[in-house]
Amino acid sequence: MPFGDGAQLRDVYRRMKREGYAFIASNVAEPNVLLGLLEGAEASRADLLVQISYGAMGFAGAGDAWAGLRALSSYLRAVSECYSIGIFLNLDHQQEKHLDLVERAIAARIPSSIMIDASHEPFERNVAITRKVVEMAHPRGILVEGELGIIKGAEEDVVSDEAFYTDPDDAVEFVERTGVDLLAISIGTEHGVSKGRTLTLRLDLARRVNEALREAGYDIPLVIHGSSGLSTEQLRELIRCGVCKINRDTFYQYLYTCTAYDFYRQRHESIVPPEGVRFDPETFESSNDWTPDKKAFDPRAVGKEIQRAVKEALMRFNEEIGSAGRSLFASGSGSGSGSSPS
Ligand code: 13P
Ligand code: ZN
């Protein structure tokens, strides 16, 4: 289906919260991961949420984040028409210093949702900054994710050596005063390379935040950042605690690099001239009849492998967390054909 807006995304979250499944909200910065995700979601008949950070926008825009956001989102919009599932875009970890970009993105109705990250600020400032984004985004039907508590690790230029867990009472006040549609909480996950087994996940806290919000009349989806490295069972437990958006980035980065590394390692002889052979890469002149093989060095060859690896990974995740078969938009799914994660 064509790219989905905030109202359609809200419908997906409502059903996720009701039935207990989630998005793996996947970060993209270039087309190979993006195409793999689209293929994986379509094959799973699951809706897809991709997200772009400020750094990824700059990367795609030759240093100009606004250009990069327009480029990546136009690409996403165009290719979305090739798929039947619901496809949504979240702007990930936007900061107060980038609010001009956020404002332009809202005016151009680019994203389905925006995450404003003012969690490093004192509570009152976090409320004020987040509220400002809500006031900008809601009139255009764009959802807003706020964050309370600090996630350990590095997310672009925001680095925290320590985690600060979310307090359930603060969470209720934060949601009440900001009007956010989703709340990211800190319960012990970390951004970057972390082993789920060595993390102490405060599931009790996630549960308490969820219950406190529900009792106060705000049954909104919770969000977990830094999910790379968590096990299937941990993801399922998080979903049982009211989490509907599970952010994942580092996993795809590693998968991308390992796939490319293996691909080139296996085709070394088709790319690098043998010992003693002189080869001019500009004229393709060789001191014997060795020439590189286009099937190995065409970037699309490795790109296809990366896309396939990402597709398979997302299909696996969607099965594991109960999202497979549950697209609200693809025909033949969305009417309860999926099963809840057990
Ligand atoms: P990881 O890179 O640890 O998967 O975290 C992703 C994230 O939280 C994006 O917002
Ligand atoms: Zn994050």
Image: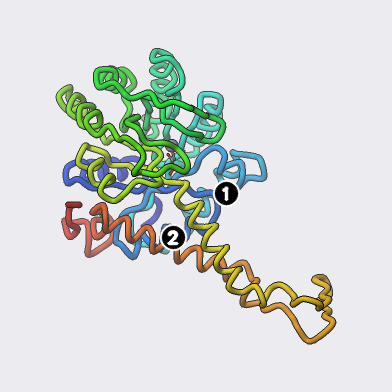
Q: Secondary structure at mark 2?
A: helix
Q: Residue at x 42, y 64 (%)?
A: 82
- Image-based side of 257 in relation to 137, left or right: right
Q: Amino acid at mark 1?
A: Ala
Query: Mark 2 sits on what residue?
Result: 310
Q: Is residue 219 visible?
A: no
Which mark lies nearer to you, 1 or 2? 2
Q: List x then y, in percent, for residue 330.
A: 28, 60
State the image quarter where residue 208 is shown: top left
State the image quarter where residue 332 is shown: bottom left
Q: List x then y, in percent, for residue 212.
A: 19, 24
- Image-based side of 90 in relation to 329, left or right: right
Q: Amino acid at mark 2?
A: Val
State the image quarter where residue 217 is shown: top left
Give the crowd class for mark 2: few <14, some 14-19, many >=20 residues within 10 Å.
many
- Look at the image and tell me in which quarter the N terminus lies: bottom left
Closest to the observer, 2 or 86: 86
